[in-house]
Amino acid sequence: MNKQVLTTLLAATLVLTACANQPDKVVATYVSPTTYSSFNCRQIISERNRIVQKVNELSGVQKKKADNDAAAMGIGMILFWPALFALGGGSDVEPQLASMKGNYDALTAVGTQKNCF
């Protein structure tokens, strides 16, 4: 394989892995439902509502980051390759979003088990 083609493929791979994921592609981190087993229904619903608000907030931040990365990728690949250096910068909140989604799942499991919903 040509050295230039190999270099281009390696650079493209590195750039693609630097892009932020869309919020709906972020997988929940596992949180044990036992974390919330001592909560009563009122506490479960209250905490779940708080987490829903936080997930929505983090999803907005993550979507903006993913959209900006996609735009930089498009500009970089078509018009101006130095724009590719903008990828990966900024605030990727994927770990926090994954954690909140995991907490939501755990609360839902406990709430269902206790017939809260």
Image: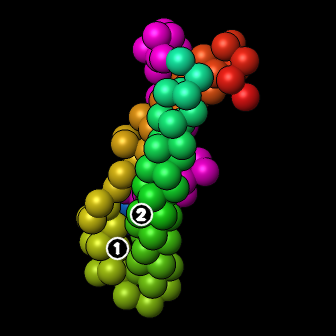
Q: Give whichever of 30, 74 is nearer the camera.
A: 30
Residue 4 in the figure: left or right of residue 22: left
Q: Residue at x 49, y 71 (%)?
A: 67
Numbered disc in front, either 1 or 2? 2
Q: Which mark is residue 61?
A: 2
Q: Which residues are magenta?
A: 18-39
Q: Which mark is residue 92?
A: none
Q: Amino acid at mark 1?
A: Leu
Quarter of the view holding residue 45:
top right
Of pointers 1 and 2, the one earlier in the residue sequence: 2
- For numbered disc 1, what is the local secondary structure? helix
* Residue labelled with disc 1: 84
3D distance between C-alphas at marks 1 and 2: 20 Å
Quarter of the view holding residue 18:
bottom left
Q: Residue at x 48, y 17 (%)?
A: 39
Can you give x and y, in whole percent of width and height, for residue 90 in the image? 27, 65
